[in-house]
Amino acid sequence: MQLAIVHGRATSTCKHPSLEGAKLLICGLLDASGQSAGDPVLAVDRLGAGRGDKVILTSDGLGLRELLGQNNSPARWWTMGIVD
């Protein structure tokens, strides 16, 4: 699991079929002190997170495949929770 801040949404005109209808967020990973920790990542979101929200991301492939109902999705990151 990884803490991240949501920078915004990503849109595309062409997606992998497993991502049709999925909301994609641009998230900046955070280190233990809350500072930026590398390049932004795309994350699938089903929780309703928005710009400025702090989220908990995971790269658990099995969980994402179950979330999307697909076994061949190229997506890696997805939101597990929104931090209060």
Image (cartoon, rainbow, N blue to C red):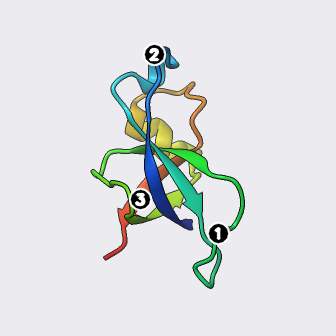
Earlier sequence position, callout 2 versus callout 1: 2
Residue 73 on image: x %, y %: 55, 28
**Is residue 71 depicted above or below 1 in this figure?**
above
Residue picked out by circle 1: 36
**Would you say the residues marked 2 and 3 are in contact, meaning their CB atoms lie under 8 Å apart?**
no
Q: Which of 16 and 73 is in front in this view?
A: 16
In terms of image quadrants, where is residue 81?
Answer: bottom left
Q: Which of 83 and 6 is in front in this view?
A: 6
Residue 45 on image: x %, y %: 38, 46
Q: What element does badge 1 sit on?
A: loop
Q: Which residue is drawn at 36% across and 72% down?
A: 83
**Is residue 31 depicted above or below 6 in this figure?**
below
What's the CA distance linking mark 3 and mark 1?
A: 19 Å
Residue picked out by circle 2: 13
Earlier sequence position, callout 2 versus callout 3: 2
Amino acid type at circle 2 is Thr
Amino acid type at circle 1 is Ser
Local crowd size for mark 1, using a 10 Å CA cut-off: few (<14), some (14–19), many (≥20): some
Q: Residue at x 40, y 30 (%)?
A: 69
Residue picked out by circle 3: 80
Q: What element does badge 2 sit on?
A: loop
In terms of image quadrants, where is residue 50?
Answer: bottom left
Earlier sequence position, callout 3 versus callout 1: 1
Q: Nearer the viewer, residue 52 or 4?
A: 52
